[in-house]
Amino acid sequence: MDSTPIEYRGCELSVIVRHMAGEFVATLLIERPGGVRRAIGPFRAFPTAHAAANFAIECGKAELDGRMTARVPQVAVSG
């Protein structure tokens, strides 16, 4: 499941959710102005796709606000 991208602080946040072993795992995609993209995750598993996507979006907002204290592994960067 791919989410509809949202705009936050001039960046585009979108989520890819995968169903694995009865749980849902999300990866967050952040696209900054100028086309620089970054993927963060995958995040921990959730019982629903909606919960996984919401968690990833909130992590993206926290990242852009400078509130992320524990960094999650960065998966990919392109630009």
Image (cartoon, rainbow, N blue to C red):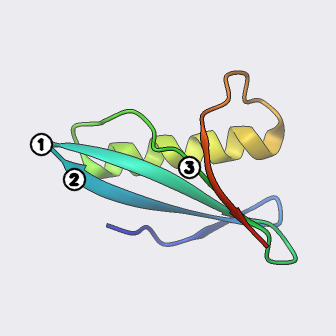
The residue under the point 80% across, 66% down is 32
Mark 3 and mark 2 in contact (Cβ < 8 Å)?
Answer: no
| Relative height, residue 4 to residue 53 (above, below) | below
**Residue at the extreme right of the image, as rendered:** 34
Mark nearer the N terminus (2 vs 3):
2
Say which residue appears at 73% left-offset and 22% top-offset.
Answer: 69
Q: Residue at x 48, y 72 (%)?
A: 4
Q: Residues within 10 Å of mark 2 (few under 14, many from 20)?
A: some
Question: Where is residue 39 drawn, in percent x and y?
Answer: 61, 56
Identify residue for label 1: 22
- The CA distance from mark 2 to mark 3 is 17 Å
Of residues 44 and 3, which is closer to you in this image?
44
CB within 8 Å, label 1 to label 2:
yes
* Circle 1: element type: loop
Q: Is residue 76 left or right of residue 15?
A: right
Mark 3 belongs to which amino acid? Ile
Q: Is residue 43 visible?
A: yes
- Point out the image quarter for the N terminus: bottom left
Q: Name the secondary structure under disc 3.
A: helix
Among the 4 quarters of the image, the one containing residue 35: bottom right
Query: Which quadrant would residue 43 be assigned to in this image?
Result: top left
- Look at mark 3 in the image and give the residue it sits on: 57
Q: How many marks?
A: 3
In the image, 75: left or right of 21?
right
Tell me the amino acid under the disc marked 2: His
What is the CA distance from the residue labelled 1 to the residue labelled 2? 7 Å
Q: Which residue position holds label 2?
A: 19
What amino acid is at disc 1? Gly
Q: Give the image location of residue 67, x and y in percent.
A: 77, 30
Image location of residue 7, percent across then percent down? 69, 67
Counting residues from the N terminus, which is met first, the one under dot 3 or under dot 1? 1
